[in-house]
Amino acid sequence: MVDRRSVLAGGLVLAGCAATGQTPPGTTAARPFIRRDGMRLIQGDRPYRFAGANLWYAAWLGADAPYGDRARLSRELDRLKAAGVTNLRIMASAEEGPLNNSIKPGFRTANADYNETMLAGLDWAMAEIARRGMTAVLCLTNFWEWSGGLMTYLSYVGEPWIDMGDPKHPWPEFPNSNSRFYGNARAVALYHAYVRAVVTRTNRVTGKPYRDDPAVMAWQLCNEPRPAGDLAHAKLPDFYGWVDGTARLIKSLDANHLVSTGSEGLKGSLEQTDIVRTEHAFDSIDYLTVHVWPNNWTWVDQKDLPGTYARGETLVEDYVRKHIAIARDLNKPMVIEEFGYPRDGGSNDPKASIVYKDRFYQLLHRLALADAQSGGPTAGTNFWAWNGEARTKNADWRFHPGDLQYMGDPPHEPQGWYGVFDTDASTLALVAAQARAMQAIG
């Protein structure tokens, strides 16, 4: 039986391919690498602009293992393609260790014997992304605990570690403790060894080295790296040295691809404009990244979105404009690569309404589009994140060990909090309209 949703999806796939000029599923075509030219990202002879999504769990679905689901990965990529999404941000790392709420399996443990099943899952995901004419940003570790991250690297070398959210270690002890990583030569060496392994890897599905694959848009140093939790604990020379040193390492291994930090921007830089500028001013860093989380930052109250939305909108607009100004000053492109908003009433239920979430998406899209149309640095947006067809079976909306319904909401967060489900038709329509508008700029 052919239902209305499948008919609409098929039409959207064709419309998306026509609108973006990208390779339709089932075909392969040589594509130029994405490069930087001043404030613009360029692919071939035209600017590269996009509406994208975060799909951190792509490699897990791509794994040939009980926790993998390649058929679902194909369906999710098709859905995203149908909505005009041409750029995905995915995790190419996860570190298994002692921290609570970290996803398992990971790509590595303390040993240099990396998880080949997970790496093969990444290969499969990248092959499917390439087959659909999409590009991906591959993130190489995490500041936060949900995929292991920097604290796990510290545990590997015998340093004291703490869990995020442990009441014995209230905020900002976790980010302050994490900042020890940047100056720990042994921890950084383990991380760099993993970076070398992934960047120089040959995809076992396509037979193509990652450094020669135009489906890779960029390598990313880390998800949301922060110099510390407060200025008193920030060892900025160590942090800057890690940023530039890692980026230069990647460039020495792969001359074809962009490198980005994964920074939130000002919120991840202790609200210091000088820190944002310095970490993105290195020649080794190709573009700025910005993350926008009004609910996490208490700019809005998810239990009272009608009463707090307007305040949040003002603060979001100011935040984005500040980063546009920094990017213009540095003459580099900018990507709003994470932005998330709760469902109405703070519900995690896919059936809950999304009036204010859609308004927030419209705001971010409008700011990005206006800047791009004016010749500014904004190249694209990646919403956080794609839940797709996943639905939690747990009444507490929490991720439990052994769950296989991977969502854009990571395992430390309520399942359904910020992610976009396949039934969120109004949000998908907004993303599709943004994709068309960004592509039409020329």
Image (cartoon, rainbow, N blue to C red):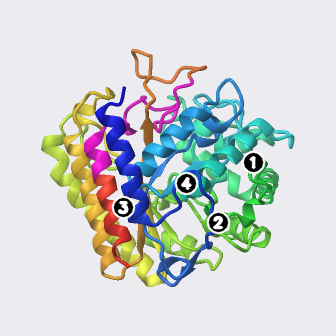
Mark 2 or mark 4: which comes first in sequence? 4
Mark 3 or mark 1: which comes first in sequence? 1
Give the numbered dot on residue 320: none
* Circle 4 residue: 132
Mark 3 crowd level (few <14, some 14–19, many ≥20, 10 Å Cα): many
- Marks 3/4: CA distance? 16 Å
Where disc 1 sits, the SS reads loop
Q: Residue at x 81, y 41 (%)?
A: 114
Pointers 2 and 4 in contact (C-beta within 8 Å): no
* Circle 1 residue: 205
Left or right placement of residue 357 versus residue 69 in this view: left
- The amino acid at mark 2 is Pro
Residue 402 visible somewhere in the drawing: yes
Mark 1 crowd level (few <14, some 14–19, many ≥20, 10 Å Cα): some
Q: Which residue sits furthest top?
A: 395
Where disc 4 sits, the SS reads loop
Residue 154 visible somewhere in the drawing: no
In the image, residue 142 lies in the stretch drawn in magenta: no
Where disc 3 sits, the SS reads helix
* Circle 3 residue: 435
Q: Which of 65 and 337 lies nearest the eye of the viewer?
A: 65
Residue 236 percent location from the top left of the image: 61, 66
Q: Residue at x 32, y 75 (%)?
A: 371
Pointers 3 and 1 in contact (C-beta within 8 Å): no
* Circle 2 residue: 214
Q: Which residue sits furthest left?
A: 307
Pointers 3 and 4 in contact (C-beta within 8 Å): no
Mark 1 or mark 2: which comes first in sequence? 1
Place residue 419 in its image quadrant.
top left
